[in-house]
Amino acid sequence: MRSLIKQIGVDTRYLLIGFPVAIVGFCLLLVGFAAGVGTAVVWIGLPILSGTLLIARGVADIERHWLPDVLGRPLARPRYTRPPETAGALRRIVNPITSGQSWLDLVFGIVVFPFAIVGFVVTVAWWALAIAGLTYPIYGWILHNIPDNDGLAHLLNLPDIYIVDAGLNFAIGVVAAVTLPFALRLVALLRGGLGRVLLTGVAELQERIDDLAQGRAAAVSAEASALRRLERDIHDGPQQRLVHLAMELSRAQRQMTKDPGAAQTTLSDAILATRETLDELRALSRGIAPPILSDRGLAPALAALAGRCTIPVEIDVQTSERYPAALENAIYFVVAESLTNVAKHSRATLCTVTLVRTGDVLLLTIGDDGVGGAHVAKGHGLAGLADRLRAVDGDFAVESPPGGPTLIVAEVPCG
């Protein structure tokens, strides 16, 4: 009820105050545009037209200030073309003319006028009907009982049919009061929708382009970081082991004729080193492209990760669908990296991993009862996960106060 009353107030203010603003804007913009275009051939029209577009920008900014409350969502302000730092006076004067959004502001300031009229009329009419109808029994009774006022009473049909008249007017007031929120919402959304399309549509498109560019850059950065880490791990691990293995085999070959017992010991050590190298290579290959993920999907792959973790992990995967490879890889690597960090740093006794689909979103939650202190700052194990998820339009959040527990939440659109 409170939110409904608040919305009625927001819509009423928007439609009533927006009407005089629309009138002033319409008159100034129409006259300015006509004068600017008409005198453009003698150059004086350029500053007039530029000034008109600046007025249109002011009117548009007023509308943008109201729109979030009316539409119930934040809206981005578009970026206007700015003149170069070295631009001269003429270039700065005509700069608004070079901005496409300035022309959209002008179109809005002119086109919104009929919408403002309709909104104002509907608002005044519905409020008047509701207030006059609901209060008619009071002021109608007062008028009916005014002594020596037969002319006014006859004019208002009060003498003999007052009760019927009062009931009819009260019913009209009740209907108007009940439909008031819907009528105001309809006309407010009509005008607000026009403002959203013309005044923020370009900004929303630009935001989407920027998000895609950031996601692409994040994906490139995440892959580059993964490749650098893989190269470092191979260099520091299997490569060194293979070099050592080659040296041991060469020594065993030399010992074979002189000291067969020592050669046998050297070969045993080499076999053990070979097994260790194979185990390390398998671990690295799981970080590149786990076959179980591509063959069987997320549930078995995450279960395999949980089985290899050094602390108990409870897995609850409530979806058996297959998703695009990029999305499944992102989820897999978030879980893999998170479990690695839990095992290394958390001192936890239990970790839980839950994956569920809610509508068109995959929701992944990873929690542990460890000491906390995890965050996504540079240099920490979780640093690249936000970038990896951003590449698939996902969100990543970590809540890990000192002392624990830790909760990692990832949301990835999958529709």
Image (tube, rainbow, N blue to C red):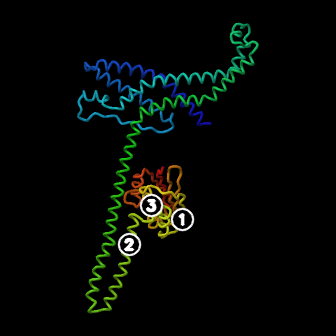
Q: Which three-letter amino acid code belongs to the residue tagged 3? A: Tyr
Circle 2 sits on which residue? 280
Sequence order check, earlier mark of 1 and 2: 2
- Residue at image coords 25%, 29%: 91
In this view of the protein, which residue sits in the foreground, 291 or 214?
291
Question: How many numbered tags mark residues here?
Answer: 3
Q: Looking at the image, which residue sits at the far right?
A: 160
Task: Identify the residue shown where x is 33% and y is 18%.
Answer: 35
Look at label 1 and name its amino acid. Answer: Glu
Q: Nearer the viewer, residue 262 or 66?
A: 262
Relative placement, left or right, of 315 versus 97 is right
**Relative to 26, does residue 6 appear above or below in the rendering?**
below
Q: CA distance from mark 2 to mark 3?
A: 19 Å
Mark 3 or mark 1: name the one nearer the start of the chain.
1
- Dot 2 falls on a residue whose secondary structure is helix
Say which mark, if any, is on residue 397: none
Q: Few, some or many C-alpha atoms within 10 Å of disc 1 (few <14, some 14-19, many ≥20)? A: some
Q: Are marks 1 and 2 in contact (CB under 8 Å)?
A: no
Q: Residues within 10 Å of mark 2 (few under 14, many from 20)?
A: some
Picture coordinates of residue 112 (x, y %)?
Answer: 45, 25
Q: Position of residue 324 (x, y in %)?
A: 44, 55
Q: Where, by quadrant of the figure, is residue 147 drawn?
A: top right
In space, the residues marked 3 and 1 are separated at their CA atoms by: 15 Å
Q: Which residue is mark 1?
A: 314
Mark drawn on residue 332? 3
Indicate left or right for 74 with 124 as reference.
Answer: left
Tag 2: amino acid: Glu
Q: Is residue 315 left or right of residue 206?
A: right
Q: Position of residue 339 (x, y in %)?
A: 46, 64
The residue closer to the viewer here, 97 or 350, is: 97
Residue situated in front as seen by the camera: 193 or 166 = 193
